Image (spheres, rainbow, N blue to C red):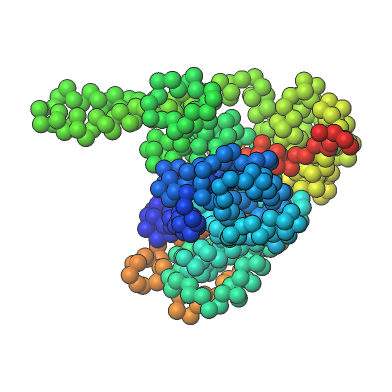
Amino acid sequence: MTSALHLMHGRLRTNIFRDEARQKFVTLLDKTVGTKAIVWDERLTGPFGLVAEYSFLREHDVAKMFPLRAGRLPPSDVDTVVFLVRPEVGLMELVAENVQKEEEQGGRRKEFVLCFMPTGSGACERVLEERRVRGTFSQITCLEVRLLPLDADLLSMEYPLGFKEYALENDPSCLFEAAQALLEIQLKFGIIPSICGKGNAAKKVYDYLLNLRREHQDSEFPTVCEIDTLLLIDREVDLITPVATQLTYEGLIDEVFGIHNNTVKLPSEKFVKQDGGPIEMTNDRKQFLLSSAEELYADIRDKNFNAVGPALSRKAKQISAQYEERHSQSVSEMKNFVKNVLPTIKAAKESLGLHTSIAELIKERTDSESFLEALQTEQEMMNAIDTDRAHPHIEQLIAKKADLTRVLRLICLQSACNSGLKPRLMDQYRRDLLQTYGFQHALTLNNLERAGLLRTQGRTTYSALRRQLKLTVDDVNEQAPTDISYTFSGYAPLSVRLAQLLARPGWRSVSEALALLPGPTLMEEQPAPAAARNRRDTGPLGLSADDARLTLVVFLGGATFAEVAALRFLSSQEDAPTEYVIATTKMINGNSLISSLSEELVPVGGA
């Protein structure tokens, strides 16, 4: 079976997106005059850290970098100020204020360049005209970067508010950008012959994609189809998985500390002796890069956390055995050991020390009474135990005024696992939450309802879905898993189960279950250009019909690390009918999903 990594590095070459983004950024910088200061929309600094480190920017005359804030820019002796922003009207007010303050200051004349990512906006430019600064810019341009590689098999649009925009605000911008990104993928890797999907967002992206293809009829698509199937998954179809607690190593790092653009900030006191591991110090925290280039991390990141301890122990014994081999070596072998093997052992020891410390920090959380009680509550809900009444644990958390996001995640999970809450229970939770946390949170509750995370009970669907899709599994082997349910210690992420069933035996076998899920079901064939052929056809690639197919799974509204782990698990199976590459609008977890929908009412005249 052709390995997924070979497919991705040898053919799909996901790093092409990084190289392309880097080149577009260089072109933008080289078109501007002299020394430069970049003023960043703060939500773009992390994504661009993936493609252009500061040392690289300095090579292109970037002398200063500032976050986009209200007021006057910090002093800088540069020739050009480049604003790099998302096309959002609210940001234009800040840009206009920065420019006006800079102009009022007088002194050395600077050029101003405004760059939208990924596309411009007429509404934004109108704001600049109203603020009378539109003509101040020597350039208003776009940096059309829609996909950034987080890993060899994982691409992200870095669109953090995508779910909120389409589910709550009825704004399809994110979905149109997703279609544009999929067109770019096909322009690089060929027309994808089979397109499947579930949910309203999936249908919209498919429709946009068809229109874009008509507009690009004259474009030259590659003659070899690298990807066999495109699977579009609307986040609204599976709202259980993102609010449940992920139990893989990488998932728990994200749950406890938050992973942002492949980096995590950890308490510095745990890493005093680490050399070379942290890439940046921030107050009392150290920032670490999490990368599959690190052998140990690649091995343990997708394991259930209960399997991480034994894996670290095995690694420690392996390193020790390697080191002990030196005692039986000749002089020439010892020289080779010191020159070639010892540096590798040192790097492995540093990696082991880092992940042992991270695992200890996570274990402190997972061994706590509050974590275990919450986890038991989640397991009961996912197994449909007493989900139609107020849960004692949730009531206790509200009484203690526990973290509101944590409480809302549990209530949303109960809503999803009960096919909605009974009206009386919904009213009770609403009343208790507002009385305890304040009536300013009424808007957040309303947003959660409108987005579908909280709803009153309609037709009962979860019980049937749980049975037909085998969403809960007893006696999960966390050490040597045989099913994707290991990622949540007994719950199989619905989204990934859909991907698994699509590959084998096919969605027609679960048509009743699909009908219970929200939104339309897509199973479409996409005609390829006459000259195109599948990579399995006889030709220079030499793939046989027995080689694994390749499926691109696109999560619209965000994906969790547990879902990524589950898809990687499916790819790794010896008899896998397909292997997976993953794209998402953004990596999310329950906290970030709830936070994106949270909004406080501000009294008239309040701050």
On the picture, is 53 further left or further right than 394? left
Q: Nearer the viewer, residue 285 or 366?
A: 285
184 and 581: which is toward the camera: 184
State the residue in front, 261 or 425: 261
- Quadrant in which residue 417 is drawn: top right
Can residue 499 be seen? no
Instruction: Return the x and y of residue 432 as percentages of the image width and height.
Output: 85, 28
Tell me residue 18's x, y (percent): 46, 53
317, above or below 231, in the image:
above
Above or below residue 224? Residue 355 is above
Q: Residue at x 29, y 30 (%)?
A: 345
The residue at 34%/67% (across/down) is 542
Above or below: residue 120 compared with residue 357: below
In terms of depth relative to the viewer, which is nearer, 217 or 544? 217
Q: Quadrant of the C terminus?
A: top right
Image-based side of 581 in relation to 351, left or right: right
Where, by quadrant of the figure, is residue 538 drawn?
A: bottom left
Horizontal and vertical percent position of residue 484: 54, 43
Horizontal arrangement in the rendering, residue 151 relative to residue 340 (left or right): right
Instruction: Relative to 142, say whether 411 is above or below.
Output: above
Q: Is residue 263 visible?
A: yes
